[in-house]
Amino acid sequence: MRITRIEPVTKTKYRVSVDEQFAFVVYKGELSRFHLKEECELTEDTYAKIKEVLLKRAKLRAMHLLNDMARTESQLRDKLKLGGYPSEITEAAIAYVKLFGYINDDAYIRNFIDSRKDKKSRREIYAILRQKGVDMNRAEEIMEEMYEEHSDQEAIRELLRKKHWDFACTDPKEKQKIYGYLVRKGFRYEDIRQVIQVCDWNA
């Protein structure tokens, strides 16, 4: 293996390419420690020692990221890759935190749904979870389980309460605006109709 390029990422970090391919990011002092120079040979022994350093660093970085806020496995993977960790190091660090239960997508999905089901529609929650990179089959299963005793109608009622809509003084035009707002939030028309119908009776 030959080091073909070393370029600065910051004042203290350097991106190293081996055989024309990105290999890893190291600190300035580690360039000297491991005798890394362009067009020099990178031995298997030296590379193994570098990977040991990177893995230790990636584990600590993963722990810090998870202490900072709850993350899905996909989000953690993206963060580590952005930090310049090679794929094999990234996967090893993720396996480490999973082994100790520091990352659990099922628990993340449950907490996410539970904290939002009174404010957002199932469709809206589903769309956000998709963006977070979770297993959508598991998300669907957990959502079905958690919505057994909860309907979108409860979330609609909560939104209407927060908006302070007074149906005794709401004209048809305003009511249509309310329907439109709730539809855009991802609620089904039938659920909206039933909630507003009850509100009309109680107005």
Image (cartoon, rainbow, N blue to C red):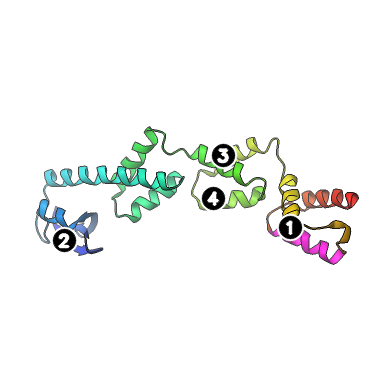
Q: Secondary structure at mark 1?
A: helix
Q: CA distance from mark 4 to mark 1?
A: 28 Å
Q: Name the residue tied to disc 4.
A: 130
Secondary structure beneath disc 3?
Answer: helix
Residue that appears at 17% across and 43% down: 48
Amino acid at dot 1: Lys
> How many neighbours does mark 3 have within 10 angstroms: few (below 14), some (14-19), or many (20 or more)?
some
Relative to 4, say whether 89 is above or below.
above
Dot placed on the residue nearer the N-terminal end, 3 or 1: 3
Of the pair 44 and 113, the residue shown nearer to us: 113
**Residue under numbered circle 3:** 110
**At x 65% / y 47%, what residue is drawn?**
122
- Label annotation for residue 111: none
Gap between marks 3 and 1 measured at Cα: 27 Å
Of marks 4 and 1, which one's residue comes earlier in the chain? 4
Magenta: main secondary structure: helix
Q: Do the numbered discs 4 and 2 sit on residues whose CB atoms are within 8 Å?
A: no
Distance from disc 1 to disc 2, alpha carbons, whole Å, reads: 61 Å
Disc 1: which residue: 163
Crowding at mark 1 (Cα within 10 Å: few <14, some 14-19, many 20+)? few
Q: Which residues are magenta?
A: 172-184
